[in-house]
Image (spheres, rainbow, N blue to C red):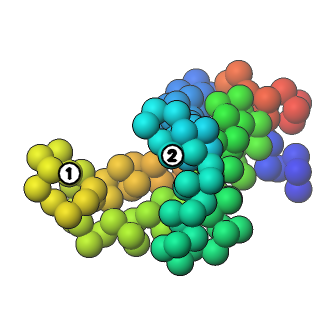
Amino acid sequence: MFKRLLQTDDNIVSFIIRITVALVILPHGAQKLLGMFGGYGFKATMNYFTSSGTPSILAFLVIFTESIGALLILLGFTTRLWAAMLTVIMLVAISVHHANGFFMNWTGTQAGEGFEYHLLVIGINLALIIKGAGRWSADRQLSK
């Protein structure tokens, strides 16, 4: 089963989408974990999530997945697992953001951000779940 999780081909497209999603998600994880890029860091992010009703284990998993999980996607290690975790996070985010409509809040006139970003991330992650990490990945080296 572990070999099936790691199995991937030498596809450059999988590599491109893997790197893209990792480079987009990793700064969000760094905001939550380390307080980088204008984020609040681990403690404040945990407090925010738990004060809004999120169980602490789920809040921790969001922070961990968006930081460490994104880094592991970047390296191509257990990519399918982390892509699945990110998909769940983005589905929850859509349920939170759907009231703001589809589009991002470019003009600042909406109550918050729409869900278009989350939908894109889900699409990328589904491709990774189906195809695997692709070229230059730890998964590929381990599954040979």
For the N terminus, the quadrant is: bottom right
Q: Is residue 54 left or right of residue 69?
A: left
On the image, the x and y values in percent for residue 75 come to 71, 29
The dot on residue 33 is: none
Question: What quarter of the picture does the C terminus occupy?
Answer: top right
Q: What amino acid type is highlighted by mark number 1? A: Asn
* Residue at 11%, 56% in the rendered image: 109
10 Å crowding of disc 1: few (<14), some (14-19), many (20+): some
Please name whichever residue, 114 or 17, is drawn nearer the observer in this view of the structure: 114
Secondary element under disc 1, as helix, strand or loop, is: loop
Query: Can you identify the residue that label 1 sits on?
Result: 105
Q: Secondary structure at mark 2?
A: loop
Give the labeled residue for mark 2: 40
Q: Residues within 10 Å of mark 2 (few under 14, many from 20)?
A: some
Q: Which residue is found at the position 57% from the left and 63% from the top?
A: 47
Whether residue 29 is visible, yes or no, is: no
Viewer-nearest of labels 2 and 1? Answer: 2
26 vs 116: above or below: above
Q: CA distance from mark 2 to mark 1?
A: 21 Å
Q: Amino acid at mark 2?
A: Tyr
Above or below, 87 relative to 13: below
For image coordinates 51% across by 46% down, the residue present is: 40
**Residue at image coords 57%, 70%:** 50
